Image (cartoon, rainbow, N blue to C red):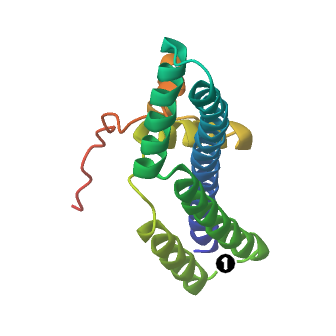
Amino acid sequence: MNEQLLDEQWNIDFSVAKSMRYHAYRRSFWEMLDNWTKCLVVFSGTAVLVSIVGEKTFLAQLFAFVVAFLSAIDVVLGFSSRARTHDSLYKQFCRLQSEISKVTQPTEANIAAWRSSRLEIELEEPTTLDWLERRSAFEEAKSRGVEIRPGWVLKPWQILLSQFAVWPQIKFPVVTKQ
């Protein structure tokens, strides 16, 4: 039974570490968009200000459109608030992994508590991006030197697009108790 509990501990730890990677990626993605948007709005806004004082050119009108477009996208998508959401989830998973790593001989109560904590954190998660989830699982397995499941291996173009949309999910076979 002790070996089974250690396996369960390892599985939960792997899942939590994968989630930490996932949310670190999402946090970085939204922070990058937030920073680039701010830089482009400042640059474009300066060009618009110059055009108001000076001559109204096509370039000035283009920059005015860029300012309006980027500002609208930021308001609608909320880059910084999404980055904060993923930062909070990352920290919660870090705390859970810290708790797991302190236990050398897990009990059934430990396993149940960790599962419960993980599910509580997952309740706060926004929609999961399948390719990014698979990418995170692949990287965590590789870092631990364990078997990499074929479904976790992505093509380079899938890795590049893994942050941008909800792509088709992996279809796992249904397991039934016999």
- Residue 130 versus residue 110 in the image, above or below: above
Residue sticking out furthest to the bottom: 109
Q: Please tell me how crowded label 1 is: few (under 14), some (14-19), or many (20+) other residues with Cα within 10 Å.
A: some
In depth, the one of 100 and 35 nearer the eye is: 35
Could you say which quadrant of the image residue 30 lies in?
Answer: top right
- The quarter of the image holding the N terminus is bottom right
- Position above or below: 167 against 94: above
Q: Nearer the viewer, residue 142 or 93?
A: 93
In the drawing, does residue 141 fall left or right of residue 162? right
Residue in the image at 27% along x and 43% along y? 173
- The image quadrant that residue 32 belongs to is top right
Q: Amino acid at mark 1?
A: Pro
Q: Is residue 165 visible?
A: yes
Residue drawn at (32%, 39%), measured in percent from left and top? 169
Q: Which residue is mark 1?
A: 106
Residue 11 screen position, x and y as percent: 57, 59
Image spot of residue 116 (x, y percent): 48, 78
Can I make out residue 154 in this image? Answer: no
Image position, residue 145 (x, y; %): 71, 38
